[in-house]
Amino acid sequence: MEQATKGRPIVASEAATGLKRRDAFATGLGVLAATLGSAVGLGNIWKFPAMTGQNGGAAFIIIYLLSTILVGLPVMISEHMIGRYARKDAINSLRVVAPKGQPWWLIGAAGGVAAFLIMAFYSEVVGWVFAYIAKSVSGSILSTDPATNGAVFTDLVSSPTQSLLWQWLALVWVGAILIMGVAKGIERATKRLLPLLFVLLIIVAVRSLTLDGAGDGVSFLLKPDFSKVTGAVVLAAMGLAFFKLSVGMGTMITYGSYFREDQDIPMTATRVMLADLTVSLLAGLAIFPAVFAFGFDVQSGPSLLFITIPAVFASMPGGEIFVVIFFVLTAVAATGAMISIVEVPVAFLSEQFRMPRKYALALTLVLLALAGAPAALSQGELADVKIAGKTFFDLYDYASSNILLPVGGMFMCIFVGWVWGFERTKRALTNNGTLNNSAAVNLFFIICKYVTPLLVLVVLLDGLNII
Ligand code: TRP
């Protein structure tokens, strides 16, 4: 055992932080499920396929894989460690761990902005998923014809009232769940339903892979063509890695603050990463073979999920029931993710200003409805309003995934590697020497200190055309 009594304990005491006892995840499985619940969401089922389709398939996936391992994972471990040590919301956790006078809390503040931008478009896509639940119940979307499926989607997203109402429903929904409290609300829903989504994705993938003409989709996923990979594509893949693992904005600091002291952080984070990757790849296998088999446009981006999945179900027995279950489970996965995004500003407002959680939540949701409206309208009324060539929807997405999350994650790793230091990292990640994982911790530290910051910096500068 290292000296736990000398120096700082691995968890700042309640007396030192002046906080009441925090709601904590009751079980190790709860921690894994909740973290996974944050990571798995529309990023896997909607964004990953959309971006893979737009950026050329296999080559994009390979860069994404590397980013996840070398960038996403180290940032996740860092965030969990800092959150568990400080036991506060993201901003105040960084205040607790930073040396006096150094503004590392700015990472958390940038994360707060990122949380808003992400929710502003994410809630809209969740709204689409809700709309598709309704449509699939009424049986109106089961077609294998690209034109028909495309028209259903376009009707939905170009209608201002529908777009706004579905988005508001998504916001009210996440608000209702959050009011039930951290441990209960998040743990329960996720633990039970994520495995079902996994099984359903396997079923869809099997159907998709056995369609006539599925082979082109498989080669799209497996045969890399690096000729189309530009700096912007690499940045997009790395941004997706941040977005996917919910890192770079303090979500995982907030979650880490609910971890138990005997939780094995490196192991938990690695498992979450692997499970999350599996879900994304399965979603790819469910979607791309069908895209090619039915002649959909592989570049169709945000609409890809919504036009392809109904087609796969239209071509299988019991499809009218499966399609309802599919969109319901997608909504469940998205809910776990939304909760974790909204939790960042709510935890901050309630702890910083000692605001009752209910008010903090209400305030957050109202602000989100305001910020989200331009995103909701950006495929209809506001389609022609562009900033830097992007609609509000795309701008929120780009600014968060491709700028704020990478910058936040880079500074997170710089903080851990260069300020927090090896001794404290080792004590925290080995749980004061009780875990037998020194080799992994050493490897993590080297990557976190040198590799991750440098990679992110180069990819950012190149992807944003600065160098
Ligand atoms: N990872 C989630 C998804 O892929 C989205 C998400 C949840 C997120 N919390 C986040 C993204 C925090 C960035 C930061 O659907």
Image (spheres, helix red, strand yellow):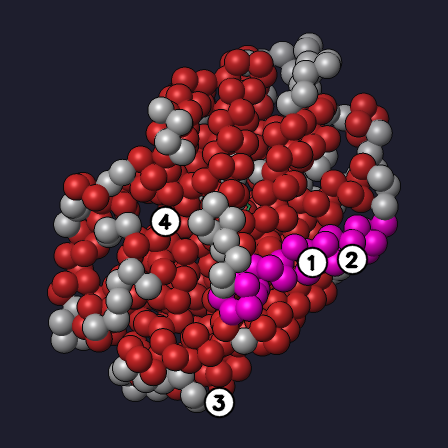
Q: Amino acid at mark 2?
A: Ala
Q: Amino acid at mark 4?
A: Leu
Tags 4 and 2 in contact by the CB under 8 Å rule?
Answer: no
Q: Which residues are magenta?
A: 356-382
> Helix, strand or loop at disc 4?
helix
Residue 406 position, x and y percent, is: 48, 34
Residue to which mark 1 is pinned: 370
Tags 2 and 3 in contact by the CB under 8 Å rule?
Answer: no
Residue at mark 1 to residue at mark 3: CA–CA distance: 31 Å
Is 223 left or right of 316, judged from the image as shown?
left
Is 305 left or right of 59, judged from the image as shown?
right
Residue at mark 2 to residue at mark 1: CA–CA distance: 13 Å
Instruction: Give the quadrant of residue 119.
Output: bottom right
Tags 1 and 3 in contact by the CB under 8 Å rule?
Answer: no
Residue to which mark 3 is pinned: 138
Q: Earlier in the sequence, mark 2 or mark 3?
A: 3
Residue to which mark 2 is pinned: 362
Residue to which mark 4 is pinned: 277
Is 125 left or right of 452, judged from the image as shown?
right
